[in-house]
Amino acid sequence: MLNLHINGTNIDNQLKQFWELEEIPNVKDKLLTPEEQFVETHFQNTYACNSDGRFVVKLPFYKSNSELGDSKPAAISRLLAMERKFKNNPDFGKQYKEFMNEYESLGHMSLVNSRSHTSKDQNFYRITPLSSHPALQQS
């Protein structure tokens, strides 16, 4: 009895199958969730390269800033309380002022003239005062 088996596999097909298995999936081929699509679109529309060669992307706002409410009365109340505290403890007031000046110089906040922006302006943004609660670490 004689048994003969010939395997005629094509090397081209095997190589093609290998590369299909090893291929990194394309993100664009994947169906994105609405949130992932928002992030992709936001990145594509807002990224830029700054003078240092770093990429910068604007932070997205997922919800309307109208949900912040009116914080101005609370912020004014805190400011007046802080000024009283600074009057009672001038060293604390000096340290707080130094901190706020540094915070501004680092670009984390900026002085805004609230009358210079109206809702009809092209660059309108809502100014939201935030209450501050300074803490002094005793040494």
Image (cartoon, helix red, strand yellow):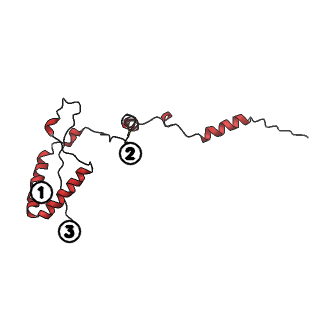
Q: Residue at x 12, y 57 (%)?
A: 82
- Identify which residue, 99 or 6, lies in the foreground: 99
Q: What element carries label 3?
A: loop
| Classed neighbour count for the residue bearing mark 1: other residues with Cα under 10 Å, few (<14), some (14–19), many (≥20) | some
Residue closest to the eye, 35 or 56: 56
Quadrant where the C terminus is found in the figure: bottom left
Task: Name the mark on residue 138.
Answer: 3
Spot occupied by residue 78 in the image (x, y as percentages of width and height): 12, 53
Q: Distance between the residues labelled 2 and 1?
A: 39 Å
Give the mark toward the camera: 2 or 1.
Answer: 2
Circle 2 — which element?
loop
User: How far apart are the alpha carbons under marks 1 and 3?
Assistant: 18 Å
Q: Which residue is drawn at 65% across and 40% down?
A: 18
Q: Mark 2 points at which residue?
A: 52
Q: Which mark is residue 119?
A: none
Label 1 SS: helix
Using the image, tell me which numbered label, if any, was put on residue 82. Answer: 1
**Marked residue nearer the N-terminal end (2 or 3):** 2
> For the residue marked with disc 2, what is the amino acid?
Asp
The x, y position of residue 95, in whole percent, is 18, 61
Residue at 23% x, 39% y is: 65
Residue at the outermost right position? 1
Up/down of 70 relative to 99, above or below: above
Q: Quadrant of residue 126?
A: top left
The crowding category of the residue bearing disc 3, from other C-alpha atoms within 10 Å (few below 14, some 14 to 19, many at least 20), is: few
Q: As displayed, is residue 35 above or below residue 99?
A: above
Q: Is there CB contact under 8 Å for labels 1 and 3? A: no
Q: Which of marks 2 and 3 is in front?
A: 2
**Lower sequence index among marks 2 and 1:** 2
Amino acid type, label 3:
Gln
